[in-house]
Image (cartoon, helix red, strand yellow):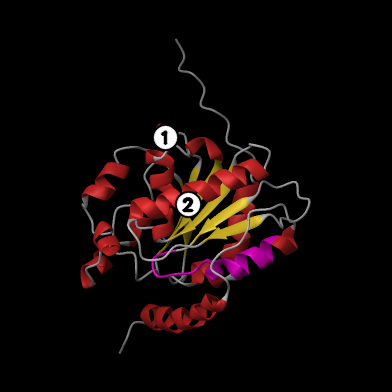
Amino acid sequence: MLDPDVLRYLGLTAVQGLTHVLPKSESVAVRGESDQPPVLFIHGLGGHRGNFAPFQAAFRLMGNPNTWAFHYGRRPLEAIAGDFAEMLAAAHRVNGNRPVDVVAFSMGGLIARYAAQRLGQTHRIRRFITMGTPHYGTYAARFARTELITLLRPGSDFLNDLNSQSPAGVGLDATCFVSDSDVMILPHESAHWLGARRCDLHGVSHPEYLLKPSVIREVYRVLGEPAPSPASPPAR
């Protein structure tokens, strides 16, 4: 008998696939007034920008209509990250050259990190949230061999290079959402980039990060929290 977490993953992945009928691109433009910074979403491997349709609809209802989702296909990671950096720059311009928030799912978190850490985009990001991102790899990546999937294997040169820096070391205000029921991130602790704040979830499968209303509300809440105070200098 299959584990219930696996069954839920398989069923919800099929549901999530319905969002792939949406357009693959959207223009970055102001869509309404809001006291919240704009948000740029980026999906996971094999996903589609439509995966974030529930997030975008919910954020609009909660008061932030200025959200956009980046789409990428099967291309080299450097090319994907370069295109993401261009869309991030466009969002930054639309926001009056002020930083915007980035919410990333699964491998999208690593693409966003590469853009921030290796393409000089950190200054354009106010808050950075990852959901189910294999920051330290996943053993599930042993079941296939493509250019992008091999990057997700624990101990890959790509991951070791990114993880040579902490969030504070690159100037990112980062929060990682981690679920103990995520069968795609093995072990699930890999979803926490050390040094980032951590939000633990229970009973949330990999696709449910994108579909579950409680997760969407929690992401919105975290984005709206006051910025953390800078650390005080050591006493002399």
Dot label at residue 90: none
Q: Secondary structure at mark 2?
A: helix
Q: Earlier in the sequence, mark 1 or mark 2?
A: 2
Q: Position of residue 97 (x, y in %)?
A: 63, 36
Q: Secondary structure at mark 1?
A: helix
The secondary structure making up most of the magenta span is helix
Image vertical order of residue 6 relative to residue 32, above or below: below
Amino acid under label 2? Phe
* Disc 2 crowd, CA 10 A, few/some/many (<14, 14-19, 20+): many
Magenta segment: does it hold 58?
Answer: yes
* Disc 1 crowd, CA 10 A, few/some/many (<14, 14-19, 20+): some
Residue situated furthest right in the rendering = 33
Which residue lies at the image location 63% right of the left edge and 54% below the top edge?
28
Left or right of 14, for residue 118: left
Q: Position of residue 178 (x, y in %)?
A: 43, 59
Which residue lies at the image location 45% right of the left edge and 84% below the top edge?
11
Which residue is disc 1 drawn over?
A: 170
Quadrant, the C terminus? top left
Query: Mark 1–mark 2 contact, CB under 8 Å?
Result: no
Dot label at residue 84: 2
Which region is colored magenta?
44-59
Magenta segment: does it hold 91?
Answer: no
